[in-house]
Amino acid sequence: MSAALLTDHYELTMVQAARQAGTAGRRSVFELFPRRLPAGRRYGVVAGVGRALDAIEAFRFDGAALAALEGVVDADMLEWLASYRFSGDVWGYAEGEAYFPHSPLLVVEGTFAEAVLLETVLLSVYNHDSAIASAASRMTLAAGGRPCIEMGSRRTHEQAAVAAARAAYVAGFDSTSNLAARAAYGVPSAGTAAHSFTLLHDTEVDAFRAQVQTLGVGTTLLVDTYDVTEAVRLAVEVAGTDLGAVRLDSGDLGLVARDVRAQLDSLGATSTRIVVTSDLDEHAIAALAAAPVDAYGVGTQLVTGSGHPTCGFVYKLVAREGADGELVSVAKRSTDKASVGGRKYALRRRSPAGTAQAEVVGIGERPEDDGDDRSLLVPLVAAGEVVGRASLDEARARHRASVAELPRAVTMMSAGEPVIPTVFEQ
């Protein structure tokens, strides 16, 4: 299916009407931004930038797409769509960057007709991926440097699972169980065996032997199918004291992990790691901070945004060409849904020590940099050509640096206000 069909019916009917009115070609500026953070969150993380750039490049109405739109728009509009190419400019926050209320995450400039058609697909990508990355970032903070593995594919739509694995990796997860994410984006994959593998064999020791013979002693053995204590004993008996890890997927994980650690140490398997899974979220991970846990496998809560499966981003027209050819600010005034008109610029105001103090959004002109600040908008598309593509490794590094410069309150998992305020300058 063409990427151009990942849009809403009214995008096309708006353009058709604007073309007939002679206003479709007016130079326009759209902004993608959050009015607020999800309730209780102290910051968010931008993800999906690379996927959005892919979508812009692939936004073409091929023959099949045009055929599907017969009856939706008229013949003249279909002819226009057949030659559609976005030829405008896009600036945005780089992937992995932290964001706050009213951060201008994307600034899209072009004709009204070209820019408005991108609304739905851009919101779809950004709302999903940033929700996952924001949850993942809190989880990796709670993990305190211990590895986190994304394993939520079976808990969401099959394509959303691939995007979720990518977004989690941007926000610090170390690997994924999803092989499509490995193939499409190079996200490292990991996995060994489930309970069904143990149940398949006549005895638990037979299952352990088969796994170790195939994957080596560095593998991870699942030890809670039957009796954990007996399984740990058998695991070390089969693999030896160089056994890579054991996985716990049930029970009071903190208590069981302490017992397993003591048993492993008593058997001489002092370097064998303990991996825990079982409906973990950032709060459960934080509660295990003092437990002898070496890695976390996270599924359902990650791919559903840990209670916030969308970020509530919107895409609004904030400026358009006036009668004199100059841009004029426009804004929505609806109750509880007001927008701030005008072309935006943004910087992260920082103290001399490099700690973030405010999100400063300039309207119509760039905020003044006092020497310690950091500009946030980078060019992503210029004259229709993608210029801001970055690697996932670059996005991961940016995420680490961006979160590290935030005030220490960012590490708190309890509900709270954004750790820095958003300030408008005009």
Image: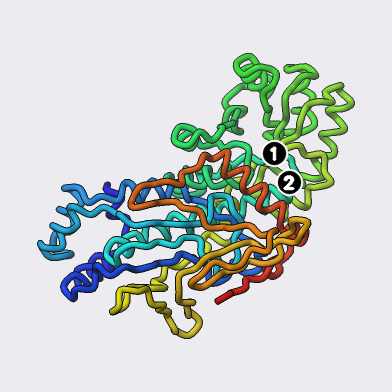
- Residue sitting nearer the eye, 236 or 353: 353
Do the residues under discs 2 and 1 have CB atoms within 8 angstroms? yes
* Up-down relation of residue 380 to residue 109 (above or below): above
Distance from Cα at disc 2 to Cα at disc 1: 7 Å
Three-letter code, disc 1: Pro
- Residue sitting nearer the eye, 288 or 332: 332
Horizontal side of residue 252 vs 174, given as left or right: right
Q: Residue furthest right?
A: 266
Residue 53 horizontal/vertical position (percent) = 41, 49
* Up-down relation of residue 90 to residue 344 (above or below): above
* Residue depicted at 61% across the width and 67% down the height: 368
Horizontal side of residue 148 vs 47, given as left or right: right
Residue 169 horizontal/vertical position (percent) = 58, 42
In terms of secondary structure, where does tag 1 sit? loop
Q: Quadrant of residue 116?
A: bottom left
Report which residue position mark 2 lands on: 143
Horizontal side of residue 66 vs 401, given as left or right: left
* Residue depicted at 55% across the width and 53% down the height: 132
**The label number, if any, that marks residue 147 in the structure image:** 1
Task: Tell me if residue 281 can be seen.
Answer: no
Question: Dot 2 surroundings within 10 Å: few (below 14), some, or many (20 or more)?
Answer: many
Three-letter code, disc 2: Ala
Residue 290 horizontal/vertical position (percent) = 84, 46
Q: Residue furthest left?
A: 75
